[in-house]
Amino acid sequence: MAILVTGATGTVGRHVVSGLVQKGKQVRAVSRNPENAGLPEGVEVTKGDLAAPESLRAALQGVTALYLIMSSDNAHTALQTDPKVIEIAKEAGVRRVVILMDYEGNPVEQIVKDSGMQWTLLKPVEFMANALVDWQPSIRAEGIVREPFGYALSARVHEADIAAVAVEALTEDGHHEESYYLTGPEALSRVDAVNKIAAAIGKEIRFVELTEEQARQGWKDQGYGEEDIEFFVQMGKNPPEVGYTVLPTIELVTGRPAKTFDEWIAEHKDEFM
Ligand SMILES: NC(=O)c1ccc[n+]([C@@H]2O[C@H](COP(=O)([O-])OP(=O)(O)OC[C@H]3O[C@@H](n4cnc5c(N)ncnc54)[C@H](OP(=O)(O)O)[C@@H]3O)[C@@H](O)[C@H]2O)c1
């Protein structure tokens, strides 16, 4: 019996796949482009589209547990997973689903709670990996980070820790009906985070604080829609307590401390140089 991983080529999904492989589990992965997935040997990669749930019916046969993403962080991939995937998974005999949530109030939450399947919801705060997406190009090219709200705090979480919780919930009992809010072990501002990267690479990085208007325009230029931009602004201007309050969930679920931003930087240092 296999475990089906959607978003398997994504930031968290790659770690979910490798964590399951390390545990000796049979993994099936979904990608729109299986030939370019670049997943570990032994992982069966199937073609599927989360916005067209029928395309997943065959991939769900013989699957006991499903890791499901609801959207993508790629500004150019307008993924909105069709919640009908849950119904099709249940029909195929899937007993357990672990969902990486994108926003509070997503109707999928009620759908999975009513499904009769075992469910676990993962609700991470900001990913540490955003530092690569957002800052790598300008750090490498100019030694600069341009951001608004430099002193807003965030308890950014390591994507491998989110995946480690997913792997536990997919493979072990005791996580049914849990909504796990996941944070890293410390709350850092953007200025703090950039200073840590600068110290690790031994290069000065200038933090240029953008006005809200400049930031809105920048996100627009990167292809983000109005709703996403409003969310980014609110997260910086009025960060919700949940975004910067450190929680012990990762250690409680995985049995080891949540990874620090310094550990994340050590893994990615070369990518900023
Ligand atoms: N970044 C943050 O700070 C943050 C914080 C909290 C929650 N989140 C949530 O985390 C989720 C993103 O997770 P992630 O960063 O691990 O993913 P990601 O890196 O954005 O990767 C997206 C994945 O989606 C797949 N995909 C895109 N369109 C698809 C489609 N139509 N059908 C099937 N697969 C499709 C891609 O696979 P292929 O290209 O191989 O098809 C890729 O594996 C989002 O829901 C986001 O809201 C993010």
Image (cartoon, helix red, strand yellow):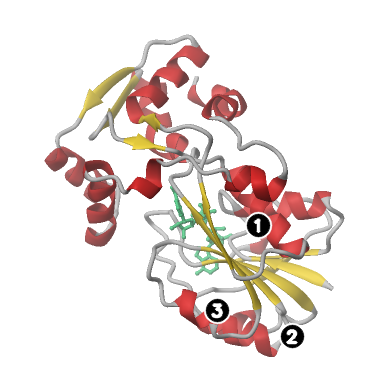
User: Identity of the amino acid at label 1?
Assistant: Ala
Instruction: Name the residue at the right extreme.
Output: 24
| Crowd around label 3: few <14 · some 14–19 · many ≥20 (10 Å) | many
Q: Is residue 202 above or below residue 117?
A: above
- Residue ID for mark 3: 112
Position in image of residue 55 (x %, y %): 60, 81
Please give left or right for residue 62 compared with residue 189 in the image. right
Total numbered circles: 3
| Crowd around label 1: few <14 · some 14–19 · many ≥20 (10 Å) | many
Q: Is residue 265 above or below residue 122?
A: above
Q: Is residue 120 above or below residue 244?
A: below
Q: Are marks 3 and 1 in contact (CB under 8 Å)?
A: no
Closer to us: 2 or 52: 2
The answer to whether the beta carbon of the residue marked 3 is less than 8 Å from any atom of ligand 1 is no
Please give left or right for residue 132 compared with residue 121 in the image. left
Q: Are marks 1 and 2 in contact (CB under 8 Å)?
A: no
Q: Is residue 231 among the parts visible in the rendering?
A: yes
Q: Which residue appears at 55% of the width and 74% of the height?
A: 49
Which label is found at residue 51?
A: none
Position in image of residue 1 (x %, y %): 84, 73
Rounded to the nearest angstrom, the CA distance separating label 3 from label 1 is 16 Å
Instruction: Name the residue at the bottom extreme.
Output: 91
Q: Secondary structure at mark 2?
A: loop
Q: Secondary structure at mark 1?
A: helix
Q: Which residue appears at 38% of the width and 57% of the height?
A: 76
Which label is found at residue 93?
A: 2
Q: Earlier in the sequence, mark 2 or mark 3?
A: 2
User: Identity of the amino acid at label 3?
Assistant: Val
- Residue ID for mark 1: 166
Q: Earlier in the sequence, mark 1 or mark 2?
A: 2
Q: Secondary structure at mark 3?
A: helix
Q: Which residue appears at 66% of the width and 47% of the height?
A: 252
